[in-house]
Image (tube, coloured by chain):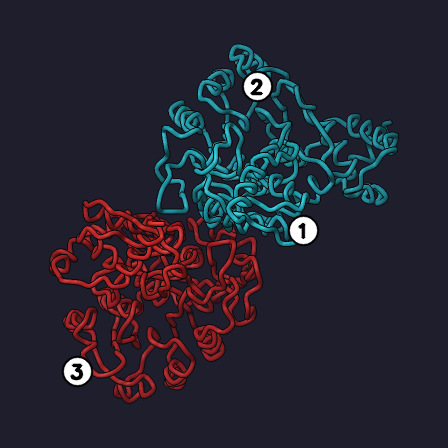
Chain colours: A cyan, B red
Amino acid sequence: MARLVVVQQKQPSFSLLPSSLSDFNGVRLSNSSIQQFSKRKEWQAKGAFQVKASSAKKILIMGGTRFIGVFLSRLLVKEGHQVTLFTRGKTPITQQLPGESDQDYADFSSKILHLKGDRKDFEFVKTSLAAEGFDVVYDINGREADEVEPILDGLPKLEQYIYCSSAGVYLKSDLLPHFETDAVDPKSRHKGKLETESLLDSRGVNWTSIRPVYIYGPLNYNPVEEWFFHRLKAGRPVPIPNSGVQITQLGHVKDLARAFVQVLGNAKASKQVYNISGEKYVTFDGLARACAKAAGFPEPEIVHYNPKEFDFGKKKAFPFRDQHFFASVEKAKTELGWKPEFDLIEGLADSYNLDFGRGTYRKAADFSTDDMILNKSLVLQS
Amino acid sequence: MAVVSSSSSFLSSLALNLPSSALSSHPRIRFSSTLFSLFPSSSPSSLSSSLSISSSFLFYPVSCRRPSVSSSFSVKASAEKKKVLIVNTNSGGHAVIGFYFAKELLSSGHDVTILTVGDESSNKMKKPPFSRFSEIVSAGGRTVWGDPSEVGKVVGGAAFDVVLDNNGKDLDTVRPVADWAKSTGVKQFLYISSAGIYKPTDEPPHVEGDVVKADASHVAVEKYIAEVFTNWAIFRPQYMIGSGNNKDCEEWFFDRIVRDRPVPIPGSGMQLTNIAHVRDLSSMLTLAVENPAASSGNIFNCVSDRAVTLDGMAKLCAQATGRPVKIVHYDPKAVGIDAKKAFPFRNMHFYAEPRAAKDILGWKCTTNLPEDLKERFDEYIKIGRDKKPMQFELDDKILDSLKVAVAV
């Protein structure tokens, strides 16, 4: 065992391990558990290995097991930080990502820590956080301002509070894109996010707020790209409300995760808001075509309809808000030197190849609203 | 990759990319065109964006780079006085660009000659901005008229440091100006092209480096300029407003709103366009003149940093007048009219963003449509245009046909 520890210390990067391990990248394995187990034991034995010992932080992520945090936590662990996920434990703390090598997954799961609890239990939040003490909090799943108070109360020496807000806070405007300085809507569906931003500012803590637009990528639990993929796979027409020229914006979750990492310990980001999403926007019709192109489906038949002519009840007939909605990411690019790595087609292909294209999705296909729309247009044609 | 931000981060990013010896003599940082594009540019070698930093640019004091709405430029590296020739079109939406640019250069202390195409006595000269060219003269500028293919003769053999061609849309028209400029040692050649040459896309906005329509006549001009000159910059504008405009823009909406007429807009009204105050176009050009090393070899979308929908523009115009507006949408094909004749903007998304100007020149947009349109409306009333009798033949045809459709 001691010999193994010595070997590990001489190898600062896991990519230097025997090349046969790299063959496992991206390939799903069924009977490699023995090798995986022995590797995990090695990494556990050597203790906390820190890549950047001087700047390593003790980080708490509120959430972190579902989508953004899954990617963010991996980046942070790779940078050598000690990362704890605060969740109720309903979702497995770690899951191997499609395309993630066994060694990477084993390394990550051996290092990630879990603090089990309900963030709505404010007393527990305050006392458990105070007991642990964290340098930085990433609040990925916070919705209401009152959820933040116990965190701040429990961590008086907190260096930075990094919040996942939403571009949904912007007041609807005839002038786009939304810039961080634009008016916000105190009545929006996302007003909890706004109230959280205000609270952070009023408490004098060093905060940074990230406002994503529509997030996409593998493991997306919001049926954004998935909605299109279901219809493309079924060879069905894609029903798009009104003209189809409404412009929206998608941002890849991995680019978002990198932005979150880039604000960590960054003095420029102190008390700043950043829009984070793709560099280009896309029309609704264009998105249908892009999903087809990325996934290798033929160009879809698009059917436009007037949503006012239908009563869909509680069901959502289309995953996007029926309006132009996009934000400038110029500030993040200029101030943080951040830049999205994925363009739309590449990003959708990444999502398809690692998720839907492998037969996984979060929400089963439901074409009931589609059929209402298509049946009506059939009637009109006849 | 952030290049123009606060000077400290700028220098540190510079340090990462260049060997220290390069800093002393006009280093050239090459941006790959993929920085701004999703698709390869049609002519990657000559039109790819590249960045070069002159040493005077590096030491620009941080304090002057504070963003401020009132100042139109934040990078002012060179105090050198330039002799600038503007070859200006005698009509159309771009005419006003030369007018503002001339006045701005003059107030910055540069020497300006503006050559307007055609005859000084032509009826075209009775319209703005030409009717106000005395303002250029009293500011110390020189105004001449003539045929740009004889530019040398028209300017009386004078020599210039900088030439802006704000006239030609095709190579036949620009070539003589470019060739003359090259032969007389003009150091910097600037060209007003058009954002209309971008290929329509599912993924707005148009950014510098995106694919352009191969058959657009401006493309040949852009290529030629890039071949002939070492120091060149190309500007692609969209629509503009501003006093002295030769072509109606907001006036089209005001005409209808003040007469309580419906505003017919083709399609859904959701199409995005880009309408800038011409002072922003002028400030971008001035930054290029005063930062020739930084601007060299670049294409700049010469537009505001906000899109507005066609419906949005109608609403903002109405707000500026303090009156209500009734917007009516129509399908030009169904009505049987040419939308180009019936409506002043393109019937499609037509939206470019000025990313290169912001990144490379530190240019700031000051266009504020709600405020700017109020000023425009004040002038509209002052000149009595609201009382002017007008015919709205195409509008009436549209409105009639819509009534017919509804009656069924």
Residue A108 in view here: yes
Considering the numbered disc 3 on the image, is that residue within a helix, a strand or a loop?
loop
> Is the residue marked by circle 2 packed among few (<14), some (14-19), or many (20+) residues within 10 Å?
some
Residue type indicated by callout 3: Ser
Q: Give the image location of residue A285, x and y in percent.
A: 53, 50
Please say if A293 is above or below A187.
below
Q: Do tag 1 and tag 2 residues touch (Cβ < 8 Å)?
A: no
Q: What label does residue A297 carry, if any?
A: 1
Residue type indicated by callout 2: Gly
> Is the residue marked by circle 1 packed among few (<14), some (14-19), or many (20+) residues within 10 Å?
some
Considering the numbered disc 1 on the image, is that residue within a helix, a strand or a loop?
loop
Kindly report which numbered mark, 1 or 2, lies closer to the viewer in this rendering.
1
Image quadrant occupied by the N terminus of chain A? top right
Q: What label does residue B121 carry, if any?
A: 3
* Tag 2 residue: A133
Chain for numbered disc 2: A
Considering the numbered disc 2 on the image, is that residue within a helix, a strand or a loop?
loop
Please say if A124 is above or below A258.
above
Marks 1 and 2 sit apart, C-alpha to C-alpha, by: 51 Å
Q: What label does residue B48 carry, if any?
A: none
Kindly report which numbered mark, 2 or 3, lies closer to the viewer in this rendering.
3
Q: Give the image location of residue B252, x and y in percent.
A: 25, 59
